[in-house]
Amino acid sequence: LTQATEEGARAQMLAAEKTKEANSLKNQLKELENNNTVALAELTGDYEGRLKGLRQKLADAEAEKAELVASADKLARELEAAKQRAVTTERAAAEGLEAAKMESDAQITNLKRRLGDLEARSAEVAGERDNLSNQLKDRVREVEVWRTRVQVVEANTCLLYTSDAADDLLCVD
């Protein structure tokens, strides 16, 4: 009996220790649960704040992306319009250049024709000049001949003055 009593007492002590140990573990578990709840609340709040910040950054990035896409679309339209203006200007310049070339060609043809006309007229004028020069030489020769004749006539001529003629010459009445 003593032995059973001792074993019963040991069993009770062991049960009391195990109960005490179980209570201690329960308290530790409650403390851990409380700490975990607090930590979880802190983490949840921290993560919610971070998540809110990230959502705002994402929204800002999306808005910036939309602005950039709109700017890129606008620049693409402006570039296309500039290309169209360049093509139109190039066409107009090419047409203007072609028209100027045609006009220049016409002017060159006209100037060549006029040059030919001037060369022909120049040849005519040179012929007329030579003809006139020959005529002038002939006239000069004729004048020289007449001059010589006049000199001969003058050398052989004697004037006879009458008194009336002499009076006329002297202005006497």
Image (tube, rainbow, N blue to C red):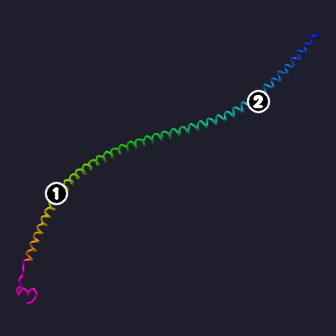
**Label placed on residue 127:** 1
Question: Which of the two residues, 170 or 108, is positioned nearer the viewer here?
Answer: 170
Q: Is residue 46 magenta?
A: no
What stretch of residues is rendered in magenta?
Answer: 156-173
Nearer-N-terminus badge (1/2)? 2
Looking at the rendered image, the quarter that the C terminus falls into is bottom left
Q: Which residue is mark 2?
A: 35
Q: Which is more toward the observer, 1 or 145?
A: 145
The one of 152 and 64 positioned closer to us in this rendering: 152
Residue that lies at the very extreme toward the top in this rendered image: 1
Quadrant of the drawing holding the N terminus = top right
x and y percentages locating residue 117 in the rendered image: 20, 53
Q: How far from the left and from the top, in percent, is residue 147?
A: 11, 71
Q: Secondary structure at mark 2?
A: helix
Q: Quadrant of residue 47?
A: top right
State yes or no: discs 1 and 2 in contact (Cβ < 8 Å): no
Residue at far right of view: 2
At which x and y percent is residue 43?
70, 32
Figure check: 131 above or below 105: below
**Residue 125 spot, x, y in % from top left:** 18, 58
Q: Quadrant of residue 40?
A: top right
Q: Amino acid at mark 1?
A: Gly
